[in-house]
Amino acid sequence: MFTSGLGILRAHIFGISMKRILVISASGMGCTIMFTPTLRAIRSRFPGAHITFVGTSSAFVSPVAGSPLVDEVQVFDFAKDSLLDMGKLGARLRFIRKLRRQKFDYSLTVFPSNKWYFNTFAWMAGAKNRITHRYQTSDLGNLGFLQNVRIPADDKLHDVVQNLNLLQGVGIDPAKVKDKALSFHVPSSDRDIAQKYLRYNRLPGKRLVGMHIGSSQDYAFASKRWPTDRFAKLADQIQGEMNTQVLVFAGPDETDEVAKMRDAMKTKCHMVQQKLPVVAALLKECDLMISNDSGLMHLAVAMWTPVVAIFGPTNITRTKPYTDRAIVITDPGCNSLLKYPFTTTSAKIDPTQAQRCFTKITVPVVMAAAKKMLDGGKVQN
């Protein structure tokens, strides 16, 4: 847990009653990043508030940990597959009891949130005003009635805008929010580590292209991944034809994919497995990021790095890179197999159907997009 007295100090400085605000992020690191414009608007409106940010993994809180946007971050072990683990029940109840003692004025659940255990957690935390989205599914299926301020979800909107609409619950007009840029807080110590990595590998001054070949494995989201052998061919071509060094970013659960890519490549590239803030600092040094629909794709946007995004079965409208410095590649006839969260509470994807979505996304297609972006092309999607 990370804490600070910034909220209390702000309350004294501004001479106002301190609001206590809880933000719950349980869907992914990328979802947290896409919430940062909303979080910034809340901080601007309530400069003296004490904002507690709770995520269900350390990755989910990483984008805001240590940031002035929040006063504390906490990680609550709330994975669905261990909800019935009686050995964890006592610790979970103690955690919730501590939250309830803070007597939050507001809680906001990061989009998407169409899960019964998300709504249950928000209800147990006990904020006076519990803000989330209203979906087309039954309240009996997601226990949405446990939250008392619900903003209609709109399947025509990007996730960033869905989150901004939650501001209505705290009295802020989302249409008046000007700063909608994504952000990721990088401590100076992690920027230093990134610079040391670049110097050690003799990369300063070279043109760099990042790649993320993975994605979350929750709900069979591994099916969002463009085939690893195509990433390998693409990396060989980029390094061979464009005088560029490739950095392949991978998380702890993507070691097998990294090994497969390394074995399939004819050239050598840099395989980067670092903690997220260091990855963010390295991405900022990249001239381009080529990625599946993943949290690192949104992280690249937050670091102002141009993106080529490869989309398979997921919804482009919802999660495309929130920037005009991006090209999105997809099979229009495929998007979107994922119906969550609007009409179902299940976020599962049929992996067999999903892989068909990548049939038409060939290495030459992605290579052409990479060349365009490296030549300074900007495409509004």
Image: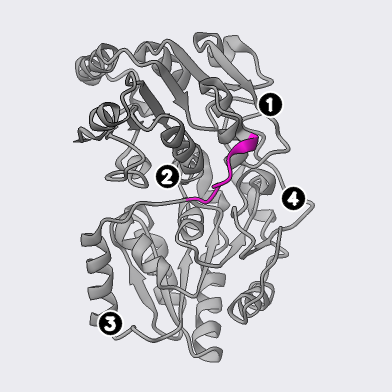
Label 2 residue SS:
helix
The local crowd at label 4, few if under 14, some if 14 to 19, many if 20 or more residues have their Cα within 10 Å, is some
- Cα distance in 3D space between marks 2 and 1: 23 Å
Q: Which residue is mark 4?
A: 334
Task: Tell me the colour scheme of the image.
Answer: one colour
Q: Does 254 appear above or below 126?
A: below
The local crowd at label 1, few if under 14, some if 14 to 19, many if 20 or more residues have their Cα within 10 Å, is some
Q: Mark 1 belongs to which amino acid? A: Thr
Q: Does 77 appear above or below 159?
A: above
Instruction: Read off the magenta span.
Output: 175-182
Mark 3 and mark 1 lie on one chain; the one further toward the N terminus is 3
Q: Mark 4 belongs to which amino acid? A: Cys
Mark 2 and mark 3 lie on one chain; the one further toward the N terminus is 2
In this image, 145 relative to 121: left or right?
Answer: right
The residue shown at (74%, 57%) is 331
- Residue in front for this viewpoint, 337 or 116: 116
The residue shown at (55%, 78%) is 233
Q: Which residue is mark 3?
A: 201
> x, y percentage for residue 278?
30, 61
Label 1 residue SS:
loop
Question: Do residues under tags 4 and 2 come within 8 Å of each other at their CB atoms?
Answer: no
Labels 3, 1: front one: 3
Numbered circle sitting on residue 29: 2
The residue shown at (39%, 13%) is 127
Residue furthest to the right: 333
